[in-house]
Image (cartoon, coloured by chain):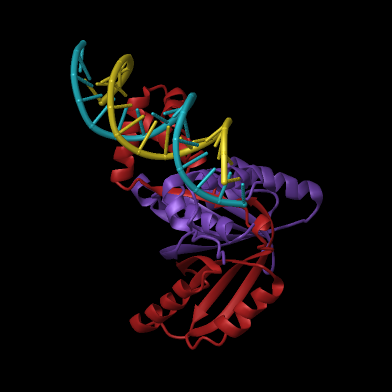
Chain colours: A purple, B red, C cyan, D yellow
DNA sequence: AGTGAAATCTAAACCAT
DNA sequence: ATGGTTTAGATTTCACT
């Protein structure tokens, strides 16, 4: 993992569709070398994959919210049940168990305020493990999934 | 935007490096048609771009936190100043202005607890606009940037 | 470790339906 | 609008330094 690898990663987390020729120019290496280093970074898992970034607004997702959840009980089985709940709901785009005021923090994209209310009132609050739900609705996104600070 | 476009988007937000031939097989269209639809989705901005997803742990980012920030004042100029602060700090990977208990919610990746403490105590808290900072440290990530729920 | 060229594969323009 | 063909370009393996 030298400065060339870091430069490759910086370039690829900005634009994952860069060709090896473009990467070669960007980092100062030959295209073949970029290809090989890139393959190694993919094989080792440093590059976990490539994804298209979609525009939520263009696809009708009008509302984003950050939701903090507290559970009633904290046993192994309860946590597993809640994890299954999270996995089953694809409006929930990110979910972290956290240490702090809340137990879980969710990042949620929905099409409308109705869909949001539905998620809160007919999904989350009735869940047997859920004790408290507090949400913040996103008004403006100043930064979204900016790259990792490499170098 | 028909079911084929949605299928393309679903495939590409899961794996952005799929070839048009692979997409053709996945969605049931010819490769040329996939190429054309894909170009249209890129041109219209529905596909905002492609990015490599990096593994934070593999790159030494040992700590992630969600930080809620409240500002002292809420004028145009104050918000702009805070927005500049956010843009300048690349440990802050996402930042949203929100309606709810907090004014801003930040998603932060740092290398260590020291780096985290430094961000809080020598960057955020001394900032003239910042009134309150409350953070939750991520213990376990159950879902991270899952795709938008299409169809 | 690094490069340059050859062979394979991919994308996009073209054309016909 | 869609699918097949072709061409120009990209990737990757190989030979070599």
The one nearer the camera, A112 or B133, is B133
The one nearer the camera, B7 or D2, is D2
The quadrant of the picture occupied by the N terminus of chain A is: bottom right
Establish if A34 lies above or below C16: below
Q: Position of residue B24 (x, y in %)?
A: 42, 25
In the picture provided, is B109 more to the left or to the right than A146? right
Specify whether residue B95 is in view: yes
Q: Residue A63 sits in which quadrant? A: bottom left
The one nearer the camera, D7 or A12, is D7
Specify whether residue A111 is in view: no
Residue drawn 48% across the image and 57% down it: A27
The quadrant of the picture occupied by the C terminus of chain A is: bottom right
What is the count of numbered marks? 0
In the picture provided, is A17 more to the left or to the right than D16? left
In the picture provided, is A55 more to the left or to the right than A137? left
Residue drawn 42% across the image and 64% down it: A141
Residue drawn 51% across the image and 39% down it: B15
Establish if B28 lies above or below D16: above
Establish if A117 lies above or below C14: below
Q: Position of residue A90 (x, y in %)?
A: 54, 43
Q: Position of residue B37 (x, y in %)?
A: 32, 33
Q: Position of residue A23 (x, y in %)?
A: 46, 51
Residue drawn 37% across the image and 78% down it: B80
């Amino acid at each position: 993992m030298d400065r060339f690898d870091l430069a490759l990663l910086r370039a690829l987390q900005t634009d994952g569709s860069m060709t090896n020729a473009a990467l070669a120019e960007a980092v100062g290496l030959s295209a073949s070398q970029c290809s090989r280093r890139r393959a190694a970074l993919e094989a080792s898992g440093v590059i976990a994959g490539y994804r298209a970034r979609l525009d939520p607004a263009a696809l009708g997702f009008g509302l984003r919210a950050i939701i903090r959840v507290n559970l009633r009980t904290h046993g192994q089985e309860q946590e597993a049940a809640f994890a299954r709940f999270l996995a089953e709901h694809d409006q929930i785009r990110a979910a972290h168990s956290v240490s702090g005021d809340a137990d879980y923090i969710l990042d949620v994209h929905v099409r409308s305020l109705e869909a949001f209310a539905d998620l809160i009132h007919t999904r989350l609050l009735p869940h047997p493990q859920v004790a408290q739900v507090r949400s913040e609705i996103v008004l403006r996104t100043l930064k979204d999934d900016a790259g990792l600070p490499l170098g």
